Amino acid sequence: MTDRIEVAATELRPLLEEFIMWARVNAPGSDPELVGPPALWHRLAFSQDLGTWKRADLRNLLLDRMPKVVEDPDAAADGMLPAVDAYLTFLSQTGRLAEGSDSLADLQAELDDVEDEFVDLMEELLDDAEGDEEEDETGDLGDFEPFADELAELDTIRLRPDSELAAAAREVPLVAKARDLAVWVGSGRRVGEDTLLTDAEVEEALAATGLPRPETDGPIAEAVPQLWNIWNLAVDLEFLEPGEGGTVAVQDDTAEWPFDDDEDVLDAWMLGLHSVDYGDPELDDDDLTMALAGLTRGVLVRLLLAGGSRDLDELTRDLSEAAADLDEIGADAWEAAGDPLAPAIEWLTGYGMVELAEGTLRLTPLGTEGVIHLVDDADIEVDARPAIESMSAHELLALSAELPEEEADAEFAAWMQLREPAKAAEELLEAASEDDSDALIRVQAASVVGTLGESAVPAWQAALKQPSLRPYAATHLSQLEVEGAPEPTQDDTHWLILDMWTISAGLGRSEFVSSLQDIGPDMVNSLLEVVWKIPHAHVEELLDLISQVHPDKQVAKTARRALFKARSL
């Protein structure tokens, strides 16, 4: 079936591409992308001739086939029938509605007849999907989603410099234990199927990691959960890796931990971040264990929401109530665990994320960094930014591009206070030169440096050597009347225009079209006659986009001609 789908899709592609172009002009209110699935399944299930459409086939396609294959019922309910109507009209107007098909009027009448039933079917699919989501929404104690609104409302969280975080990560006891265990494992240790290690090997591993030997009458391998957690952490950290023939082996550079390079240290620590789940209590009863699943993450998110610290007794009551509310056996599980927070706090302390002092549990800077990453992994928004004093020029520019103007101005002002103006200009323009394709970073940097006046002259003069920055440098040096500075050329002006078009295109199609219409078709035509010569990273992309979206046919034609010339260079 897969091969048939691929063949049918290949046959359809040219026709659908032409339809999309046709629809932009002739059916602007429709979404031509929605016609792909019905056109494909019409070809697969009803007619090998792409142009043969029957009223009965159309009904079966929409009411029987589409509910089984549609990916977005909400979009389909709103737009699939108008899209199919536009597609059938396109086939008819371009002579592609084959002989033997029902008339366009009859096909459109069928669309009208099935509309209510089709929409009802799509709404049923939506209801089913929402029901499934509700079933999945129970989560566990470590689910961040219930706190999404509170997390989004937190004040800005300032993250510590990488050098400081790396220094803390080098001191993390659990990573050192994972290293020692991996080094003990060696280059090719065979592991068992039922238990990874024999009791004798477990004794050796406990000694290698500095863990105490438990008092037990049964197999020792069943009484050392902390050892197995450290084993799993060693795998997470990529200190251990599976080998051939049922063996495991230490990675070559494991013994070098803690690494010299800060980035390598933090990369390794982040690999093991999800080990926080190993801090959850493990009880003899699996159901009771599951009732407390996510407890360690629950500790972290509550600390973050409280500004980084909580009274331990208060936090314990909070989580105890949450466990009871979340699961009908949650209270029983909490009681059976005795002190459920003890293993969670022990693991988080060992991973360098929390500190407990005088009855108060606090996130460390490393812990704050880690929980922010976990929140981000859960696709939840939180306003976390590097500390101003450690923020690079590129980080500042990238962050400010996503902030409201007033907040961005405040970030720039705070950052500039820590530098001499000449040094700030140098750093900003160097950051802007890192990626010739990033017009937004370039424009932001030039705008800020432009406010520094004569202090920025040395940085502007150095920027003349960078093709992507030369237009800005020449413009500002000319405005400052710097002796010997080159005058901006027409090419410089055209580069600036291409940068602004690139930024406008990134805001969305409607914004882009509006910006083009603001300068009028005559001016756009004049620019299109010359900008294709500029070696700008986005010139071909922009010309192609103008040819597709500009409402003036003459402008679109000029853009296509300019695109051809640009591609011929």
Image: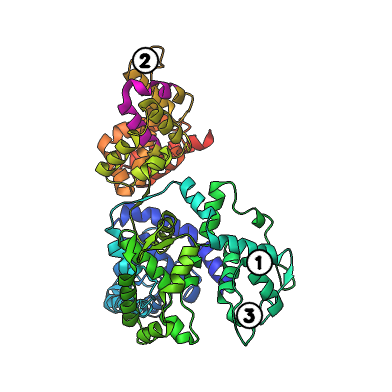
Q: Looking at the image, is 163 positioned above or below residue 331?
A: above
Q: Residue at x 34, y 20 (%)?
A: 454
- Point out the tag, 3 or 2, that comes first from the N-terminus: 3
Determine if the magenta segment contains residue 454.
yes
Residue picked out by circle 2: 482
Up/down of 556 relative to 352, above or below: above
Q: Which mark is residue 208?
A: 1
In what element is the residue under mark 3?
helix
Q: Nearer the viewer, mark 3 or mark 2?
A: 3
Nearest to the observer: residue 250 or residue 536: 250
Q: CA distance from mark 3 to mark 1?
A: 15 Å
Q: Quadrant of residue 464?
A: top left
Asked if residue 224 can be seen in this view, the reply is yes
Residue 418 at x, y percent in the picture: 36, 34
Are circles 3 and 1 on residues that touch, CB within 8 Å? no
The magenta-colored residue range is 442-461
User: Dot 2: few (<14), some (14–19), or many (≥20) neighbours within 10 Å?
Assistant: some
Sequence-first disc among 2 and 1: 1
Residue in the picture at 59% in, 73% down: 212
Name the residue tied to disc 3.
Answer: 221
Query: Whole-Å distance between the Cαs marked 3 and 2?
Result: 77 Å
Q: Report crowding for label 1: few under 14, some 14 to 19, many 20 or more residues within 10 A (C-alpha).
A: some
Residue 35 locus on image (x, y percent) = 39, 65
Residue visible at 42% across and 24% down?
459
Q: Quick check: 58 above or below 92?
A: below
Residue 556 visible (yes or no): no
Label 2: which secondary element: loop
Q: Secondary structure at mark 1?
A: helix
Quarter occupied by residue 398? top left
Q: Main secondary structure of the magenta part?
A: helix
Q: Which corner quadrant holds the N terminus?
A: bottom right
